[in-house]
């Protein structure tokens, strides 16, 4: 606290002995020691309070910095969420357009198949006629062999 060496303390003791006298010196020394102890405790208390305030200020600065970083992350995450929603909407619209295109193509194929059905029926009946004729030929060949 105070930068006092042994020689300074000895000098103060000799001056106090001469000024106060040997009879009252022990009482004055006790009282001075008591006040010096109180002063030392007070200085220690003030020093601790100042250090505590400094630590509290540092913690407030760290907290504010962390809060700013957290806000920045929240903004980044919300931007990414909006981008994902936009992309999902675009994909949904593309999917709907593809489904509509498939529905249109299926409708066109159904229309084409229904218009070709009488021709297919005629071809099928012609095929059946050929099969019957082929079967009759096979029966005739079998009978000829026997």
Image (cartoon, rainbow, N blue to C red):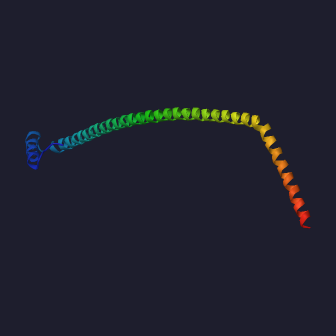
Where does the image place residue 68, in percent across and percent down from the top left?
38, 34
Using the image as rendered, state which of residue 46 and residue 134 is in the foreground.
Answer: 134
Residue 24 position within the rendered picture, expressed as x and y whole percent measured from the top left: 15, 42
Closer-to-camera residue (80/116): 116
Horizontal side, residue 91 vs residue 28: left or right: right
Task: Please tell me in which quadrant of the rendered image residue 4 appears.
Answer: top left
In the picture, the quarter occupied by the N terminus is: top left
140 w.r.t. 94: above or below? below
Residue 92, located in which quarter of the rendered image? Answer: top right
In the image, 129 versus 48, the foreground residue is 129
Q: Residue at x 17, y 45 (%)?
A: 26
Q: Residue at x 21, y 41 (%)?
A: 36
Q: Which residue is nearer to you in this view: 123 or 85?
A: 123
Residue reaching furthest to the bottom: 146
The outermost residue toward the front is 144
In the picture provided, is 92 more to the left or to the right than 11?
Answer: right
Percent across and percent down for residue 62 are 35, 38
Horizontal and vertical percent position of residue 61: 33, 35
Q: How many marks?
A: 0
Vertical relation: 17 (above or below) 67: below
Answer left or right for 31 relative to 72. Answer: left
Q: Quadrant of the C terminus?
A: bottom right
For image coordinates 86% across by 52% down, the residue present is 133
């Amino acid at each position: 606290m105070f930068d006092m060496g042994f020689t300074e303390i000895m000098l103060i003791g000799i001056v106090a002995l001469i000024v106060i006298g040997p009879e009252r010196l022990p009482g004055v020394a006790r009282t001075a020691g008591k006040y010096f102890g109180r002063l030392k405790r007070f200085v220690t208390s003030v020093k601790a309070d100042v250090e505590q305030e400094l630590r509290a200020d540092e913690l407030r600065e760290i907290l504010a910095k962390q809060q700013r970083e957290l806000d920045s992350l929240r903004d980044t995450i919300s931007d990414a969420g909006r981008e994902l929603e936009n992309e999902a909407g675009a994909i949904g619209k593309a999917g709907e357009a593809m489904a509509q295109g498939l529905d249109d193509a299926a409708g066109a194929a159904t229309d084409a198949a229904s218009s070709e059905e009488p021709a297919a029926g005629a071809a099928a009946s012609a095929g059946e006629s050929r099969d019957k004729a082929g079967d009759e030929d096979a029966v005739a060949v079998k009978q000829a062999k026997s």
